[in-house]
Amino acid sequence: MPELRQDPASHDWIVIAAERAKRPDEYRREKKPEQRPAYVADCPFCRGNEDQTPPENFAFRDGEPNTPEWLVRVVPNKFPALTPSGDMTRRTETGFFRKTDGVGHHEIIIETPRHDLDLATIEPAQAERVVLAYRQRFHVLRQDPRVENIIIFRNHGKSAGTSIIHAHSQLIATSVVPNLIRDRLEAATNHYDDTGRCLLADILDKELEAGKRIVDENHTFVAFHPFAPRQPFETWIVPRKIRASFGNIDDDECRHFAHILQRTLYRLYIGLGDPDFNFVIHTAPVRDENQSYYAWHLQVLPRISTPAGFEIGSGMSINVTFPEETAAFMRNIDTPAPSAVRSLNHE
Amino acid sequence: MPELRQDPASHDWIVIAAERAKRPDEYRREKKPEQRPAYVADCPFCRGNEDQTPPENFAFRDGEPNTPEWLVRVVPNKFPALTPSGDMTRRTETGFFRKTDGVGHHEIIIETPRHDLDLATIEPAQAERVVLAYRQRFHVLRQDPRVENIIIFRNHGKSAGTSIIHAHSQLIATSVVPNLIRDRLEAATNHYDDTGRCLLADILDKELEAGKRIVDENHTFVAFHPFAPRQPFETWIVPRKIRASFGNIDDDECRHFAHILQRTLYRLYIGLGDPDFNFVIHTAPVRDENQSYYAWHLQVLPRISTPAGFEIGSGMSINVTFPEETAAFMRNIDTPAPSAVRSLNHE
């Protein structure tokens, strides 16, 4: 019997189509992940090829900007979706259709100088640098008075939209608040007005109470498969300390976030054989950073099934797995460096 | 300079990233569409294999149900997303997460008994039968008091989510109104309350006034590339006579709709070399069929680029083409059987 479940954050219904169900381990890719060399001459993100990108905006490095001794490097996208110059005035065509110049920022966070490593497998200190770089860019870009919203995201694998294989994340700062985010804020505001509580904090509490969809936790974050996932193995990482904006997290949160994110990606890597995925940091728009009703968090969406006409037309997803089963499967996968994580939990 | 454009129907912003722009003809697939045999023994949708599907719900045919002499055949999906039985009561988990049984209908409209034909290339009378079958199933299923919303859609090609290549469309009737559709209705209602006009009728008028994005028209329908397309070559087919529900179209509209749909799909087939696409008939929920603020229409979405983290996180699409250019390209493609279409326009 299929089940309809409602995502409390978006109010979207999803279908769990049990008739088509597979066991979690049936999603594991058979092919071995490709072995990559540590350096590729024409890869613009490899150490030594700094002249193949626009000049950097930020780096953790020794030496001068745009020289090889960096650990994490942030550069403008060479083919940006949005650009920092332009006229922000809203114009219309025939007095009806609204448009404006595509003003904003589009940056690449190169996560390691090495071509053969990935975010799931770099050393923990390096993953922390990646998160610190996210936050640093967030701090700088929210100072631009034209910026309304900042999206940090990562595309991993061809079906997730990657064209460059070298490990990197992206940041797009827009001069409009996306309609989708307005909708999420409205749902959160209504919940806050009705209950006096942050919607995501309530979701987290209820997930902890139910217990069966939790994958991982440390003293600062919880990773779980949500009640109404759009895709098999969709995973949310939610902070225990509610803040509307990712930009406001402290150093301790950066470290713990990096670790639980790595553990989550490592579980996907081992459990499913390096699946394609996207992740997105959901955060309040820049002018809503002090609201109590919203909480920043991260969503990982493996690209396991293909959204088709029904999903496009209805916004409803058809998922063929129960998150209770996928969470149990992921929970049972050993993660690397448990001692490092344990020491973090008790430091 | 990139451009931000707002879709007036959804209020979603899309980015037109001119820096990455290609000419329309650069999207044409080089590989020739596969030649298929007229009959395949293990294809459940081929004539003669009627026992490989569940018993039919409807057909245009001679002879008894489930025998070979049919032209269009509608069967329940063998692996349905939703099923007609179940308990519609809304329940909660831990008093918070909402769920219910997945009650609904999931049907397949087999568009031709022949394995080697497709909707773009079947004879016009056969395409009319397909549209009449859509409407017939709509009429029957909206009588089910549990049905709130009906989505008719088509997935063409692997990246559009097809698993069976034989030409078919699908229908899913749900016992909830999808949140996405509520959002569209709200935008349309607000426009109606502000202006006294149907939003889609205004969009159509403004597109006709602008002219440059029109691809095709007959005396009953207009096909155009919308001002703010999510993908290159996104095409809308909008009726000149506004009706909230697809279920209420008359025979004449069925015929003209079938023809402009075929011409649209044929243009994509020739112009882009049989691209993968989805189409969806957008229609008012069953209990809103008599509203004046909404208009049913069809959207074709070629699967040309891959939505990635930014699109998932923001709901904003990045499109690398201007619809003014893609529409001009499509307008200039010759369509088959112009005499048949001309006679329709003047009958």
Image (cartoon, coloured by chain):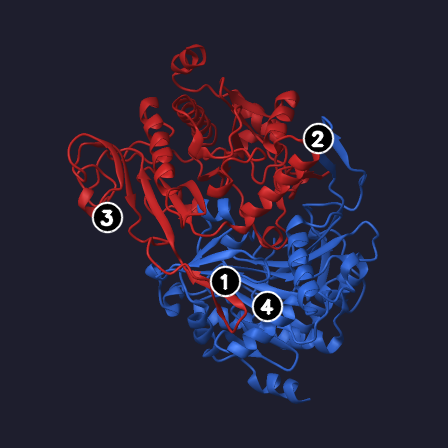
Chain colours: A red, B blue
Circles 2 and 1 in contact, beta carbons < 8 Å: no
Can you tell which quarter of the image residue B208 is in? bottom right
The vertical placement of B341 against A146, above or below, is below
Instruction: Determine which quarter of the picture holds residue B90.
Output: top right
In what quadrant of the picture does the C terminus of chain B appear?
A: bottom right
For marks 4 and 3, give the CA distance: 47 Å
Q: Nearer the viewer, mark 1 or mark 3?
A: 3
In percent of the image, x 50 and y 59: which residue is there? B230
Same chain for the residues under marks 1 and 3 in the image: no
Q: Hey, what amino acid is under mark 2?
A: Phe
Q: Residue B119 — which label?
A: 4
The chain to which mark 4 is attached is: B
- For label 2, the residue is B96
In this figure, which residue is indicated by the disc labeled 3?
Answer: A54
Foreground tag (4 vs 1): 1
Say whether marks 1 and 3 touch (CB < 8 Å): no
Residue type at mark 1: give it. Answer: Pro
Q: Position of residue A62 (x, y in %)?
A: 18, 30
Query: Which residue was labeled with disc 1?
Result: B229
